[in-house]
Image (tube, rainbow, N blue to C red):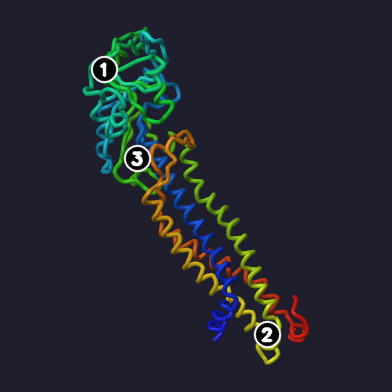
Amino acid sequence: MLWKLAWRNLWRNRTRTALTSLVIAIGLLAMVFTDTMFVGMNTNMVKNATNSMLGHAQMHAKGFRDEQDVKLTLNDLDQALANLDSHPHLAARSLRVITHAMLSSSGGVEPVLSLGVDPQQEQFLSKFDEAIVDGDYLNFVSGQNLILGWKLSEKLELRPGDRLVLTAVDAESGEMAQELFRLSGIFKTGEGQMDSSMVLVPRQTLQQILKLEGKVHQIAMRFSQLTHDGVPVLPLSGQYQSSGNEVMLWTELMPSLYMMTQMTDISMAILGIILFLIISLGITNTLLMGLYERLFEFGVIKSIGTTPWQTARLIVYEAICLGLFSVVVGLALSVAGTALFAHYGIDYIGIEISGITIQEKIYPELEWSRLALYPFLSIGFTIIASVYPAFKLWNMLPIEALRKRKL
């Protein structure tokens, strides 16, 4: 009986109820869409970071990342590869030789980071082959061709086919070694550091220059099955590491990006509390206005024997009906809005966040667990908002309500 009466009372003032419901629905829409936007943005940035060159994990000799010493190559390479290949979810791996060098041409001299790769392996770890904007990608694991970023090509006034000299320090004697290359292609990844200071050369050629035949500095890995955070489902425990080597996930290689992805829940919690508190104030105001308009009516029903508990429940039931109706409208708007943007995407291409340049549209991702959580919270805050009006009605004396219509 009270539920039926609460529903009827709710629609006595249709305009006010509709506006309040719209406020709650828009608040729910804002929460759901913001959450899906954060999830889609995190997915996009992790994908850009791991696809550009990083991979899901990397293996180095201990100390190499800190010292960048050309002599710190991987220990017991064959055993390390055998251990990694035994991982059931390993999808691809790429062996790399890395050194700082000087690149000179008729247009000038620039310091560069030289990456020696096997082109066939590397195309499964990074997108350099897809980023070529002029010329051709590397074809063989040895040879005298190289590719570099478009910003570097502008600094040195280079075009495909031009000759360049790469100068580096060999690992055996520490003396300068030079090699003549021909520019094969120019890439544009969208990452400023890579486009302005990185060159890719055939791995075996760079090994010969550095006198590191058969040795590498890094193994980059990609896995087929990942957790929600983008790390391998099966952990890379000690059995995949050889003596003197270390395996680091992208979360350790780029801690700032990982921390930002982990801040999503905290950010959403703060935003949700602020938003729902504002909505709760609006709901409280609506219920108090309704109570003021029906003050004489409540005085009559309390005079004929209705208990304070029953009248207070009536206000709470009205709030629950208002919350349920608003949640239905909000869910419909949330699903429709998210589906629309998930189809067309949001164009933030070129914007840099935490050192990662967004290279693709962001597509909001709807998590069904959140779609159940936010409506529950909306109804919960609606009930909380009804506590004060219900308390006022509980303590109201019938004679006061019949005599005057103010609280």
Give the answer, above or below, for where 15 lies relative to 211. below
The residue positioned 54% from the left and 82% from the top of the image is 3
Query: Are the residues flagged by discs 2 and 1 in contact, CB closer than 8 Å?
Result: no
The residue positioned 69% from the left and 88% from the top of the image is 300
Residue lying farthest left? 140
Q: In front: 42, or 134? A: 134
Residue matched to label 2: 297
C-alpha gap between disc 2 and disc 1: 90 Å
Q: Position of residue 184 (x, y in %)?
A: 27, 19
Q: Position of residue 12 (x, y in %)?
A: 59, 79
Q: Position of residue 402 (x, y in %)?
A: 75, 86
C-alpha gap between disc 3 and disc 2: 70 Å
Query: Are the residues flagged by discs 3 and 2 in contact, CB closer than 8 Å?
Result: no
Q: How packed is label 2: few (under 14 Cα within 10 Å), some, or many (20 or more)? A: some
Give the answer, above or below, for where 355 lies relative to 39. above
Q: In front: 403, or 122? A: 403
Q: How packed is label 1: few (under 14 Cα within 10 Å), some, or many (20 or more)? A: many
SS of the residue under disc 2:
helix
Q: Nearer the viewer, mark 3 or mark 1?
A: 1
Residue matched to label 1: 145
Residue matched to label 3: 236
Identity of the amino acid at label 2?
A: Glu
Mark 3 or mark 1: which comes first in sequence? 1
Give the answer, above or below, for where 33 lies relative to 134. below
Q: Position of residue 171 (x, y in %)?
A: 35, 13
Q: Quadrant of residue 53?
A: top left
Left or right, 355 with respect to 223, comes to: right
SS of the residue under disc 1:
strand
Is residue 398 at least partly visible in the picture? yes
Identity of the amino acid at label 3?
A: Leu
